[in-house]
Amino acid sequence: MRRRSDLGAKLISAPYVVWDILFIVAPLIFVVYYSFTTKSGDFTFDNITQLSRFIPTFIRSIWFGIEATLICLVIAFPTAYIISQRTDRIQRTMVLLVMLPMWTSFLIRTYSWMLILDNNGIINSVLTSLNQAPVRLLGSNAVVLGMVYNFLPYMILPIYSVMAKLDYSMVEAAQDLGGNRATVIKRCIIPMSMPGVVSGITMVFVPSVSTFYISQKLGGGIDLIGDVIERQFQLTQNYNLGASISLVLMVLILVSMAVMNKFSDEGEMVL
Amino acid sequence: MKDNVIIDLKNISVSYGDNKVLDNLNLYIRDKEFITFLGPSGCGKTTTLRVIAGFIDPDDGEVIFDGKKINDIPPHKRNVNTIFQRYALFPHLNVYENVAFGLRIKKMPEKQIKETVEEMLALVNLKGFNKRNINSLSGGQQQRVAIARALAVHPRVLLLDEPLGALDLKLRKDMQVELKNIQQRLGITFVYVTHDQEEALSMSDTIVVMDGGLIQQIGTPTDIYNEPKNAFVADFIGESNILDGVMLEDCLVEFSGHRFECLDKGFMKNESVDVVVRPEDVDVVKPEEGMLKGVVSSVTFKGVHYEIIVDIGGFKWMIQTTDYQPEGANIGLFIEPDAIHIMKKSKYSGLYGDYSSFSDEFDELSIVEEEEE
């Protein structure tokens, strides 16, 4: 009986294992392989060593990612808390509203922002029609805005889903032991929402750091590391350099996440 | 009568929509007593507790604590603490920090916090558990942490909301004794909510029996057991044979076609009443010596005694006796005057019937379900 169910479990999981190997493990191996080889397939460190010229781009990407993540967190935490305090019906509606923008294509949403913020965009046409000087809106702030706008739901939803499941009697227990509203939020709700915060940070930070479309449309010439990678594949067809940048970016993201996780763990203890 | 009252509930009403959960409830609680709210689920006992804790604002009525009205005082400023049904321990904190939670909010110096926490953990027999994770503890241990956490802030009154409901029988009995000890040692008021009549009888100084948002009876455990006010109380507390009777005159009642001497007075002549006879108060005798005669329809061995169901003129009595009576035997029943308790008719009269549908199987089934959980 037991043996049969083991076999069954294996059979059921087989497609996923095959899928994982085909589309996650294999591409990773390719990335590593291309990173350390020349076009002709010889082993080399050149791809890695010449990355030093992209250091400012790496730093800018990570900085923008951190900015966007923090802004998302500041907006999302209270939003998620407010949603989680409503009745079930209102909660469902509010969650639906949070997810609504995600039903439109990411490309169209970003493109629309460009139409709004562009030098000849909606805001500037209004300004000129009122005889005001046009403002240059595209640039780094617009890129961060684009990231926040696109990735905010990915911060709200995980935090909300943790908060919605919080046992309310713990909040009552904290009140019971003398905690006023602020204390209850600080010592009870924030620490207990940490799992949601951590996964929200991951889900916003990672796509923010590696995005290229947002910076292309809203950056007004600002280059992020995603743009550089895209160019290596689309324009110069230098797969080896592109792969090495991706590899380094991946390592940087992993390191950032590790630092953030450690930070949030310690934060929990301090709180 | 009303000396050293610590909590006084006056005309408290609470409703959720059309559902009246508490209906004009009046109750006072004396300082340092162990008082139990007892009743079936939905009777309003937990609501009463939450009104005292401050989590529910009553629609009507006054909550008086130590002579002052506290209706508008939020829970965190009330000198009462609660043990929650599911303990509500903080999973992100270890045992020490859970117990220290209330002390840290009070901004107590670290040295004093340490002393108090150690003292509380010793009180609940959890010495050395300081660094343990909450989720690694058993139900009984979590229960102890919850008690230590609530007592650490030195409340005047401890509210306990079915605190032992999630524990198994053996542990529950041990904790009952321990809770009673703690209450007596610390000399604080315990307000205890339970649906378990045995728990209520063995721990309380005062029992408040509730049903349908109303208090049915307040009294000591012995009063409640021996002198139930109506059929609901008689049925809910312990086993009882509840019969229709007619009070012929003071100390003389007729039921089951026989006249009995009893000790109850003050009823109208020929007033119809409810008669309670506890199963352990009936003596089994030879048929010709009995006041009532019947046939044994089932026998269950209970360890200390046999529980027999006797058919007397169609009404099934439950009787507990130490002498074995075979099924189908003709026996007589002898009832002493002090074994008979007379109650006025109430809206509960006639609701409980006899023991014809009584079966141990129900108990056994529910135990199996609990184990499977």
Image (cartoon, coloured by chain):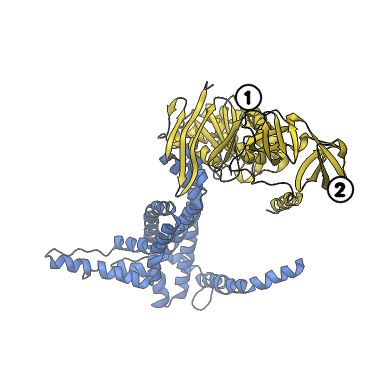
Viewer-proximal residue among B25 and B104: B25
Q: Which chain is home to disc 2?
A: B
Colour chain A is painted in = blue
Q: CA distance from mark 2 to mark 1?
A: 50 Å
Q: Amino acid at mark 1?
A: Arg
Secondary structure beneath dot 1 equals helix
**Image-quadrant location for residue A122:** bottom left
Residue B328 as seen in the image, left or right of residue B93: right
Q: Position of residue B11 (x, y in %)?
A: 46, 34
Q: Amino acid at mark 2?
A: Glu
Q: Is residue B107 visible?
A: yes
Viewer-proximal residue among B52 and B40: B40
Asked if badges 2 and 1 are on one and the same chain, I answer yes
**Image-quadrant location for residue B190:** top right
Say few, some or many: other residues with alpha carbon within 10 Å of mark 1 (under 14 / 14 to 19 / 20 or more).
Answer: few
Residue B59 as seen in the image, left or right of residue A15: left
Q: Position of residue B22 (x, y in %)?
A: 50, 41
Q: Earlier in the sequence, mark 2 or mark 1?
A: 1
Viewer-proximal residue among A100 and B304: B304
Height in image: A221 above or below A166? Answer: below
Secondary structure beneath dot 2 equals loop
Q: Which residue is mark 2?
A: B327
Q: Position of residue A262 (x, y in %)?
A: 51, 49
Query: Residue drawn at (30%, 60%), measured in percent from left and top?
Result: A141
Number of callouts in the render?
Answer: 2
Q: Which chain is yellow?
A: B
Q: Position of residue B49 (x, y in %)?
A: 53, 37
Height in image: A237 above or below A257? Answer: below
Q: Which residue is mark 1?
A: B185
Q: Is residue A151 visible?
A: no
